Structures are given as C-alpha cells and as structure tokens.
Amino acid sequence: MTGTGAGVVIIGAGHAGGTAAALLRQYGFSGPITLVGEEPIAPYQRPPLSKAWLKGEADADTLALKPESFYAEHDIVLRLSTRAVALDRAAKAVTLEGGQRLPYETLILAMGARANRLNVPGAGLAGVQVLRSAADAEALKLALSPGKRLVVVGGGYIGLEAAASGRALGAEVVVIEALPRILARSSCQALSDFFTSYHRARGVGVELGARIERFEGEGGHVTGVRLGDGRVIACDIVVVGIGIAPNEELAKDAGLDCANGVIVDEAARTSDPAVYAIGDVTHRPLPLYARSHRLESVSNALEQARQAASAIAGRPPPPHEVTWNWSDQYDLKLQLAGIALDSDDLLVRGDPAAAKFAVFHLRGQPPVIRAVEAVNAPAEFMAGRQLIGAQKPIDRRKLADPTVSMKEVAAG
Ligand code: FAD
C-alpha cells in the first residue's frame, strides 16, 4: 500500500516510534511520515544508558537507533524538541505545543513511559534524579567518580545496573529496597538472592525492607537519605528507580480505551482503527499467557512496531514473539524470556555459585516452560525461548541435568 494525503504521524521518537518509521519505509509505504519527539535528539536506545554508556564504554553514536542522515534520506520528517499536547480524533489532527495542528491519515502513539518519582520530603533536591533519558544518564555520569557516594532507590533491573556501573566507576553504592527482596516485581526468589549476594560481594550495601522517610540536603543539594528506622545514609547522589508509568494521558483525553497503558489488539490497533499504539505506552494482549499486560522492553517495542507497520503497509501480520529482555551487571549477562506468570514449579539448572545457571518457570504435567531467567547461560536462554514459544512439554529430569544439552532437552 502507498500512503496518500496526511500520511502517518508518529508521536514519540523513541525506540518504538523510530523503528516504526524505518519499517514503514522498508515495507514499501511511500506516503508522508512525520515523527514527533519531545526530546532534543533523534531516536536512541535506552538500554546502554545504565550499562556501557554510563561506564563510558559507548559513545553517543552507538546509542543512536539510526545515523542522523537516515531520516532525510528516507523522507521521514523528524520534528525533535516538539511535544504533542492534544489529539482530535474526529478531525484526525494532532495539536503540537505552540498550537500547530498536524493532520494524519493514520496515527501511531509511541510516547513510552516516564520514571516514577518518590513522593517524600526532599525529593526535589539537586542530586536526586531518575534514569530514563540520555539527559538523565549524562547528569549521572558527570556526578559519578571514585569515592562519590551513590544511593540507588529501588532494587529493580535499572537500579541494579546503575549500582554495578557506579561500582565500576569507583563510587560507593547503597541500594535501598522497600520490599523484603530485590527484583520482587519481575523475578523469582532464587534470582533475587543471587543478585543480592553478588552485589554485596562487590561492595554494594543492600538494604531490604527499608522505608525512606525523606531526603536530607544542604544548600539545596542532597546529602543523605533518612530511613524509617532513623538511620541516615550519607550520599552525594541518588538515583530513584522505582518503576515507570505509561505516558497515556494524550490517548486517555482523546477517549481511547486505556488501562495502565493504551489498550491495543494483536495488530497494535487501539479502540480507534486509525490509531495504533506501540511500545512501553501500551497494554497489549499476550496470546501465550491468555491475558493482557504492559511490557517494558525493547523486544516489545520492536514487535509492536512490526505489527503496526505491517498493518499500515498492508503486509501480513508478523508472527507472535516470545517477549524477552536482558540485564548486564558486572560480568553477568542475565537474559529473560517469557513472563514469570502462572507457573507452578521452579527448576534451577546449573550452579548459582559458579554464576552460570538458569531458572525455569514450569507449568503442568508433563511440564511446559512459561519463562526462563538465565545468568551467563545463553544456551538455556535460547532453547528456553523456543520451547516457551512452542509450549512443547519437556522431560523435567533431562532439563534438571546440566550434562544433558539443551538441544537434547528440546528434542524431547
Ligand atoms: P521510549 O523509548 O521511552 O520513547 C518514547 C519517546 O516519546 C520519548 O522520547 C518521549 O520523550 C517521547 N514522548 C512522550 N510523550 C510525548 C509527546 N506528548 N510528544 C512528543 N514526544 C513524546 N529494555 C530491554 O529490553 N533491555 C534492557 O536492558 C533495557 N534497559 C533499559 C535501561 C534503561 C536505563 C531504561 C530507561 C530502559 C531500559 N529498557 C530496557 C527499556 C527500553 O528502553 C524501553 O522498553 C524502550 O525504550 C521502549 O521504547 P518506547 O519507544 O516505547 O519508549
């Protein structure tokens, strides 16, 4: 299909929006494409912000999704530092900050998510920040150096990556987690225990079940974190990593169905057939798990960009994918596939003490794999991901035995 008239407008020039624009051209869509983003830089990858980039091991060019010249070369109008403020679905137009109206034939919402802030006294002090954008990462990088004291609020993946990167830069680091274990929202106890020990062994203080009463400061800059038990952890900088919230307000105000994200179908269509939504901002079906969920991953952003671009360009829908994610901390490569929901059995393959193992989330008898969390175990991750997609029953005894190859496990 070729587009005509107002063409496709994409709101949000992040991983999902940037990918959708490129895919539309790759799939032969020849109508106008306008990519609107409020950040001042062209679409970039966020994962390195807490990993290689923070440690100074990657430069701005490696962050970029596409070279700067790509957009003009492919006739994609890139409007940076431009915020969309309203959506008029009846007139098929987006209003930009400043009042300009941008007509569309098809709209893709790709506004992503924003980092949650901690609502306690002192949260506005200089030196208390989140880690979502390149600007956030730049501020953190400038603040971290040997001897600096970093407090990370929240023991999720981004917080733990910031902690590991902080240690690599010579900072003193304390992670403060409100729940009794880190990674509680996304991972199993075995993984939480492993990462807690790994961080502690590398000099990171990990405070579990800790309530933050306030941030203390001097001269407008943070100097410490006061806990509910009265202790004050002195610090120079705080990174708050306590989850994200979808930027769904524009869609909600325009009457699109939303519920912790813009609700979409398997083709990334919203409740308005002229409007698609992709990436972190969506609440999407997960056919494999017979439910809807809001995912926060690059694999989700890419899959939904493919779904929307295929539908708009008139191509057959792409195959369903098993969602996956990763985290790099120290010398650990964690790879996750599937979602740790609905399992009734956990199986650890390999040796956590050797920092090479995988936790399989199983369900039923004979069991199928619902999710895998693999630490320095790429074969387990790859075979696990395939087996999740196939929902093929496996032999539990073989899976438990690391001398049996994953190829053999998969063969049944
Ligand atoms: P985003 O990349 O957030 O892009 C949305 C864009 O829309 C933003 O630029 C935003 O400013 C813009 N926008 C919002 N509202 C408007 C508006 N009204 N008008 C104009 N523009 C607007 N995922 C993994 O799979 N693996 C990882 O290891 C991993 N590590 C991560 C590390 C960090 C530090 C962070 C922050 C994220 C990480 N993620 C990781 C998550 C991954 O980056 C996101 O899932 C992905 O960026 C989602 O893409 P998106 O396009 O939906 O959202």
Image (tube, helix red, strand yellow):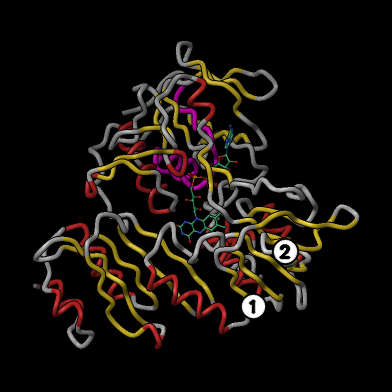
Q: What span is in magenta? A: 6-25
Residue at screen point 48% across, 11% down: 91
Residue at screen point 83% across, 57% down: 217
On residue 168, the disc is 1
The amino acid marked with disc number 1 is Ala
Quadrant housing the N terminus: top left
Residue lying furthest top in this view? Answer: 90
Classify residue 105 by image quadrant: top left
Left of 149 or right of it: where is 270?
left
Q: Is residue 151 above or below residue 315?
A: below
Q: Which residue is mark 2?
A: 230
- Say whether marks 2 and 1 touch (CB < 8 Å): no
Q: Is residue 235 above or below residue 82?
A: below
Mark 1 CB in 8 Å range of ligand 1?
A: no
| Residue 324 x, y percent position in the rendering | 35, 59
255 or 103, which lies in front?
255
367 or 38, which lies in front?
367
Q: Earlier in the sequence, mark 2 or mark 1?
A: 1
Q: CA distance from mark 2 to mark 1?
A: 30 Å
| Residue 35 x, y percent position in the rendering | 54, 34
